[in-house]
């Protein structure tokens, strides 16, 4: 038999008694769950669709108070090509400016950050 040290118990028999009491108090299997019938895949899918519909309804209720507040159009609503062209041109011009001023590596590293700030403010 293995040598298991049980602090607080005088003998292995006392430890076994305590473990048996704990097992009686909280059985490993829940008797309520064992009596339920298994749910079919179709029923699970139907329940998930119902939950999705409920979540969509809750989301609509959350969004409803903000409808018509004149919010700025999202970035996805703006045509992307003019924005991409402006960003590329800004980056190119800033790069040329850094070359002329001789700012070196720190200036070259700052070009994308400056271009993104300009892009953010324009669009």
Image (cartoon, rainbow, N blue to C red):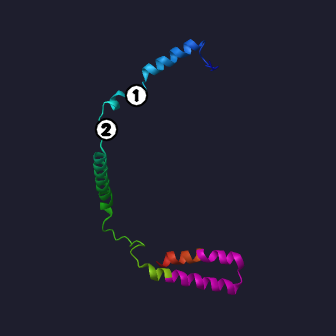
- Secondary element under disc 1, as helix, strand or loop, is loop
The image shows residue 103 at horizontal and vertical percentages of 70, 80
Figure quadrant of residue 38: top left
The answer to whether residue 32 is magenta is no
Figure quadrant of residue 13: top right
Relative horizontal placement of residue 14, taking residue 70 as reference (left or right): right
The image shows residue 91 at horizontal and vertical percentages of 58, 81
Q: Which one is earlier in the sequence, the residue at label 2 or at label 1?
A: 1
The image shows residue 111 at horizontal and vertical percentages of 62, 77
Give the residue at mark 1: 29
The image shows residue 45 at horizontal and vertical percentages of 30, 49
**Mark 2 crowd level (few <14, some 14–19, many ≥20, 10 Å Cα):** few
Relative horizontal placement of residue 4, taking residue 57 as reference (left or right): right
Relative horizontal placement of residue 17, taking residue 41 as reference (left or right): right
**Mark 1 crowd level (few <14, some 14–19, many ≥20, 10 Å Cα):** few
Q: Give whichever of 97, 42 is nearer the camera.
A: 42
- The residue range painted magenta reads 85-112
Q: Give whichever of 91, 13 is nearer the camera.
A: 13
**What residue sits 64% from the left and 86% below the top?**
96
**What residue sits 30% from the left and 68% below the top?**
68
- Secondary element under disc 2, as helix, strand or loop, is loop
Discs 2/1, front: 2
Q: Which mark is residue 38?
A: 2
**What residue sits 32% from the left and 57% below the top?**
59
**What residue sits 50% from the left and 83% below the top?**
85
Number of numbered discs overlaid on the protein picture: 2
Relative horizontal placement of residue 51, taking residue 102 as reference (left or right): left
């Amino acid at each position: 038999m293995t040598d298991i040290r049980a602090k607080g118990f005088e003998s292995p028999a006392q430890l076994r008694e305590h473990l048996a009491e704990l097992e009686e108090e909280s059985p490993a299997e829940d008797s309520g769950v064992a009596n339920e019938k298994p749910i079919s895949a179709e029923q699970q899918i139907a329940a998930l669709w119902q939950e999705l519909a409920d979540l969509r309804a809750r989301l609509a209720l959350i969004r409803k108070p903000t409808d018509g507040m004149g919010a700025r159009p999202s970035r996805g609503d703006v045509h992307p090509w003019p924005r991409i062209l402006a960003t590329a041109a800004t980056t190119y011009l800033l790069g040329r400016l850094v070359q002329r001023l001789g700012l070196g590596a720190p200036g070259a590293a700052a070009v994308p950050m400056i271009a993104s700030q300009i892009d953010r403010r324009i669009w």
